Structure formats: structure tokens, C-alpha cells
Image (spheres, helix red, strand yellow):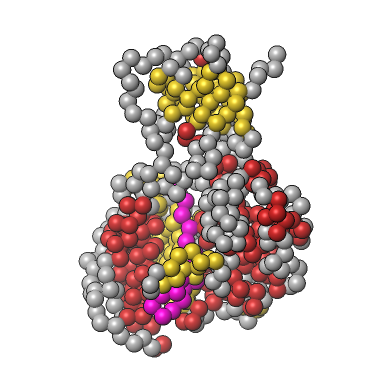
Amino acid sequence: MILFAGCAMSPNIQPPAARTVNTPPVSMSEKDVASLIPQFDAYTREIFGKSKVPGMAVAVIKNDSVIYLRSFGVKNITTMEPIGPDTRFQLASISKTFTSASIASMVGRGELSWDDQVVTLDHGFQLSDQWVSDHVTIRDLLMHRTGLPAYAGDELQDIGYNRQEVISKLRLVPLLGDYRSSYAYSNIGITSAAEAAAKKVGMSWEDLVADRVLVPAGMKNTSARFTDFANAADRVDTYSMMNGTPVAGPLLNDDVNSPAGGVSSTINDMARYARLQLNEGSIDGKQVIDAAALKETHRPQNIMRTTNTSIMAYDLGWESVAEKGRIRVEHGGDLTSGVSTYITLYPEEKMAVVVLTNGFPGGHILKKAVISGWDDLYFTGAVQKDWYSEIETGVLAAMKPGASAAGPLEPLPPAPAGAQPPRPPAAYMGSYSQDYYGTLRVEPDSGGLRLYAGHLTEPYFLVPYDGDTFRETGTGTAVKFTTENNGTVTGVHAVMLDHPWIKADFVRVPPDY
């Protein structure tokens, strides 16, 4: 059943002010849940208006029923077309839960096990340590415990490499963490698990997840292919939030890492997905995924962090949080192009909350505040604090320069007095090579140089800074050419491609005359 459904006001209309906070805890019975809906709706309206995020959709599921489903705001701030229950959003990293669900289906059918070694399924899989390569399992990849550096491989996707090319480059990535006793978030690790599982049954992962999860679960408007999202008649545009103002940007195509971040869906479909997850793989009387196999995806398996009052662990494509005497199983997703989403399961309560937004970072603040508000209302009877302001403070601090997970990119200071002019453009023109990143091409430009990395067709623009050092206009960072004593350019260091575990140093390729 649906106790509340509809489309909320335009983001330009301000909702009423917030109401009660710090009410003493109360005991919540089943019959009282419906009474929370008006309070939750008012709270959600209020923080949505505060956020300036263009659009959002929210669902709450309890005991296999949808007790709240509402869409807020607009798909596009130009057309102002309202979001509806079948409007598609990109899910970002919630996609990881679809990967573990599709593999759970295979485990339940006896087609593979969580502890199958990946090389037995995908003979081309190889890490930089041969022993680790030979022993890594599907479970290891889904738990982020291979030793790969956090987010390794994403930088290759950024410069145009396809899925198989990125996976093939993992043999060049140093394992900075200890195998099976470390945690480092890895999109390409999840994708590698999906690819290995799909090879086992001779399907693409996109077809596998549709066959094992989406179709049998009745998720008619959900897909793991970017084109299905981009071409959908009813979908959101995505917005980065610049000082609280939504700025439309190009949609991000995450097909390379679709098993980790490329699924799109609607709030109606996600309500069905939450029911499937809460009901041990069953929906509408149909067992879609084996109950024991799906339950394994919700089991804490790799400790991420602990405090005196809580513990957080990674499961198989999910995260578990134990605090306040209860457990949540959840996962969020964020794309800086303008996507922020969250799904939280409360298994013991047979309850879930799903939030989809088309803005970032405003959507990140908003989704966390929505879920925290429901958590307070359900377990204590009242919203206990100004969640939006508290979460906003943390997010803004995390996004300060130098706070990036990839490490800070230091922009160049103003050019020194007496800066030297560069050499003629012909001195720098040509190709430069590195095993991991592949090839850079340098060509002349009216204001300096153009640099093409990997398979990119759009260049980085370089302007003169001091002698053989140029400034990349997008990041303000250095691109420094190296020379021999006779002045011949022999290499280049492109700081905008640096990561903590790899320096973007390239050697010039001799011209082929």
C-alpha cells in the first residue's frame, strides 16, 4: 500500500519552518507508524526547499508495503517539468548492490561461490602481485580487500579507457594495502567481480543483472546501460551545486564501471528493489534470489572503522553500521556531475528508506538529512537536531582544497619575475608514453599547447608559465617538460594526472620518420 504519494512544490517555493526537536524518546509501535508520515513529509519538504537541489524522490518501505512515496521539484530547471514516480535517476554507487544481488542469484543456483578464485572465471585478471592474483576471490573484490589503492583505475576511465582496458592495467598498480587485512574502496574491483561472474554464464554483466534481478523483480524502468538512461523520455538532468546554485552539466556516462556506478532507476522501481532486499529475495510471492545467498550480501565482513559506540563494516556491495543497539545495511552514491542517492535497510524492522536526487553536493547533504530525520522520527518520535546544517558543515569541510581522497592538486603560484619564454611549439610536439596511462599527444595551440591524454578527444590546454613549464588551465597545475643538455625535450610530468600512488611522468616517443 501507499499511504502518501504525490509531487511536491517547485524548489523556488519555500516550505514552512522546521518544528519540534529534542523531544524525549518514545516507544514506536506498528500502529503508530502511519502517524509519522505527515511529520516526515513536512520535515522533508522543509529541508528540500532549504537545499536548492532541483529534484528529489523519496520512498519509505515497511513490512513489504510502501508507506511513503513522493517526488519533489523538477527534472530540469529550464523546463520546470516536475519529477514523477517513474522519472529515472542515475544511482551511482548504489549500483554495487545490484552487482552483489546478481552474483547472489548465481550463488543460489550453484553456478559459482563467493570464494571462487577470480582467475578461474576470468583468465585475463591479473594484479601486480602474482600470488595475490592467483588467490583473489569474488568475495575479496566485493569487500574491497585486495590491497588495490582506493579508486585506482578511475583515472583511466577519466581519460577514455574502456572496461577491459582498465581491468588489464591493474597488473601495473602497486598493492598498497595488505591482502585481506585492509580496506580501500575500489570501483574497478566491483566491476572485475561482475565481469568474472558474467563470463561464467557467457553473458554481459548488463544482461546478467537484467536477467537475474531487474526483470524478475518487475523493475521495468531500471537499466545498467547509460544509453537507456540518456534516451529515456522521463529522466532528470543533473546539476552541480555552485554556491547553492544548480549548474547543469553533461550527463556522466559510467558504462566503464557500470557494475559499480552505472545503474539508473526510478523511485517506484527502487521501492520494489527495497522490498526484494528486505524480503530475503522474494517479491510478490516470487523467489527471485536465494534467501541465504542474498543474506550473505548483508553480513558485515570487512571492518572499515570503529568507535566506542559504533562499528562500520563493508559487506558484499553494501555497508553495515551497528549503533544505538540496531543495525543498518546501506549504500550511497555520488557523482560530481550532479547525482546523490541513498538506500538504507533496517533488516530487523523490515524497513527501508530510499532517496534519489539530481544535485551534488547539495543532494548529498539532503539525502543524509532525509534519512536521519526518518531514523529519529521512527525510533524516538521526533527529529532530534538540525540534521541539514550539521551534515552541511561536514560536507563543506570535506570538500575544501586538499581534502580530496585523491590528494591535493597544488596550483602553480603566479609566474616568477623574469619568467622565461617557452621553446618554439615544435620542440614539444609529439607523443609521450607511460605503461599505465599510455600515450599523451602534444600539439600546438594559439595560446600555447594542447595535450591529449589516453583516448580523450577533448584536450587539456597548456599556457606558458616559465620556460619549459606550462600551466594547465583547468586545474592551474604544472605540466613540466624535461630536456637533455642540448635542449632536446625528452619527457613531461603532467601534475593534473598525478595520484598518491602514481606520478604522471611520460617519456617522449622518438618520431617515426
Residue bounds of the magenta highlight: 321-337
In the figure, 287 relative to 491: above or below?
Answer: below
On whether residue 201 falls in the magenta region, the answer is no
Residue 186 visible in the shown view: no
Residue in the image at 30% along x and 85% along y = 26
Residue at left 58%, top 56%? Answer: 178
Q: Main secondary structure of the magenta part?
A: strand
Which one is in front, 119 or 355? 119
Residue 394, quarter of picture: bottom left
Q: Residue at the spot x=72%, y=61% of the render?
A: 117
**Residue shown at 38%/74% (left/top)?**
309
Residue 10 location in percent, x, y? 33, 58
**Residue 458: horizontal and vertical position, in percent?**
53, 31
Is residue 487 visible to us here? yes
When the figure is inspected, residue 103 is found, relative to residue 51, above or below; the finding is: below
Please give left or right for residue 495 compared with residue 181 in the image. Answer: left
For residue 26, above or below residue 15: below
